[in-house]
Every structure is written in C-alpha cells, then in structure tokens.
Image (spheres, grey):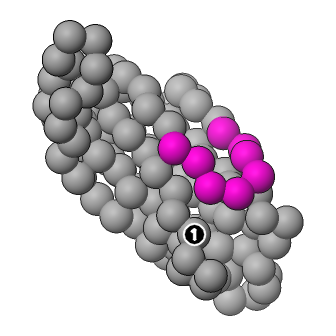
Amino acid sequence: MHIILHISIAPEWQQGRVDMVNPLVELALVEHANLPGLYELPGGDTYALPLVNGERIQVWAAYTATQQSVLQLKYQQQVLLQLRQQGAFHLEMVLPDGRHYQFHWQIVP
C-alpha cells in the first residue's frame, strides 16, 4: 500500500475561488517497523512546512490499521488542526501567512 500526503498552495484568490494550485511537497508515509498496519512519516517525525512568510507549520500524519487518516498541524506549539477521518480526505485552509493551502490524502492499495 502507498499513502501520500500532497500539500499545495494557491497563489491567490480569484473572485472567491482558487484558480491555480502549485504543488509544494508530496510526503510518502511508510509502514511502522514494529506496528503492522500503521503508516507514518519516516521515523515518526513531523514535517516542517515552510510558509510564504518564512515561518513553519509542523505537519504530522499517520494512517492506522483501522483505516483512519490522522493529520495534525501545529504553529508555534499551538495545534491549529487535528483531523481524524476514516479513509482519504481533501482539506483546504488558510494558514497563518494568509495563504490558502490544500492537503490531499492519496491511498493506493
């Protein structure tokens, strides 16, 4: 199984909608060595997502043996978002730099 978290940014709003999206990063989750069925970022670490203003958001992601997708975003030690959902997801939100980001979960059996 391959599980990938795609993170993109929209350059700007166009009349209340996003016109174009620029991919930033694709994070491939790997299966945990000691816990079969648990997928996480390599080493169980977070990913420091650089924002346009130079600050960083800490991204933590996992996929559990019960097929739950988990995403957590932290900014300056504060949890901005904690998502736990069955299966794949697509999330759009404005982060502290005022830009519109997209998080898309891809599960390939």
| Nearer to me, 99 or 21 | 21
* Residue 31, quarter of the rendered image: bottom right
Does residue 98 appear left or right of residue 1 in this picture? left
Q: Main secondary structure of the magenta part?
A: strand
The residue lying at 36 percent from left, 25 percent from top is 95
Q: Position of residue 12 (x, y in %)?
A: 16, 23
Quadrant of the rendered structure where residue 58 is?
top left
Question: Given the image, on which type of amino acid does mark 1 rest?
Answer: Ile
Q: Is residue 66 magenta?
A: no
Residue 29: give x, y in percent of width and height.
Answer: 52, 73
Q: Which residue is mark 1?
A: 107
Whether residue 41 is visible to the viewer of this picture, yes or no, is no
- The stretch in magenta equals 83-90
Residue at the image position 51 percent from the left and 44 percent from the top? 90
Residue 61 position in % (x across, y down): 57, 56
Mark 1 neighbour density, 10 Å: few (under 14) some (14–19) many (20 or more): some
Q: Quadrant of the N terminus?
A: bottom right
In this picture, is 44 found above or below 61? Answer: below
Q: Secondary structure at mark 1?
A: strand
Res 58 visible: yes
Image quarter in which the C terminus is found: bottom right
* Image spot of residue 56 (x, y percent): 31, 39
Give the quadrant of residue 17.
Answer: top left
